[in-house]
Amino acid sequence: MARRRLNTVLMLGAAALLLPACEGIPGLGEETVLDDTSWSLFAIRENGVSTRLDPDLRERHGITFESDGALYAQLDCNRGQGRWSARETGPDSGTIVISGMTSTRAFCPRPSFGEQMAAELPSATDFEIAPRTGRLRVITRDATYIFERSYDR
């Protein structure tokens, strides 16, 4: 009986030590404003030039951030998936990492921004939700992707 109690105490102690390590795993302790949200691509800004998408193109380009760290992307006529994690540095902003991005490779009719999104999103460094418009800005190495919230989840 004493041995069983000792084993229980040791297991509880080990679990208590491991719990803080789980805090950095998306969905286990660190919620962000991006958890369980979907966004349609509104515009892309590169080299000081902004390209605004028409409503049809917006529906064909978007991203979804799941609270378990999964990322799903609509890349025009292709679909993508990967992983994401974020750390808030302010109420509606922070750093973001997108990794393991894979996608289907069908040829989409022009204009299309799907291939560009798939290539650029893994270089994302920061995000911000603009207070006035509610639009999400994802800043990558070469461009800023501006998304509008999708509420049809």
Image: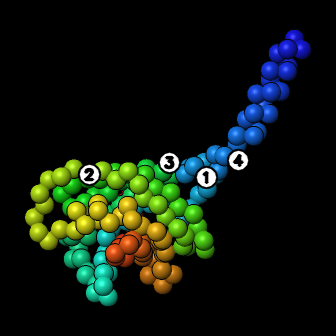
Q: Earlier in the sequence, mark 4 or mark 3?
A: 4
- The local crowd at label 3, few if under 14, some if 14 to 19, many if 20 or more residues have their Cα within 10 Å, is some
Q: Is residue 38 above or below residue 133?
A: above
Look at label 3 and name its amino acid: Asp
Q: Which residue is mark 3?
A: 68
Secondary structure of the residue carrying tag 4 is helix
Q: Position of residue 42 (x, y in %)?
A: 31, 75
To which residue does mark 2 refer?
A: 103
Residue annotated with mark 1? 24
Tell me, yes or no, if residue 123 can be seen here: yes
Percent x, y of residue 126: 48, 71
Quarter of the C terminus within the rendering? bottom left
Quarter occupied by the N terminus: top right
Residue 93 or 57: which is nearer the viewer?
A: 93
Q: Splitting the image into 4 quarters, where does residue 99 fall?
A: bottom left
Kindly tell me whether residue 65 is visible in this rendering. Answer: no
Residue mark closest to the camera, 4 vs 3 = 4
Q: Position of residue 40 (x, y in %)?
A: 33, 67
> What amino acid type should be assigned to the residue bearing mark 1?
Gly
Give above or below for 108 relative to 132. above
Q: Residue furthest bottom?
A: 48
Q: Distance from label 3 to label 2 (Cα)?
A: 19 Å
Judge depth for marks 1 and 3 and give the one in front.
1
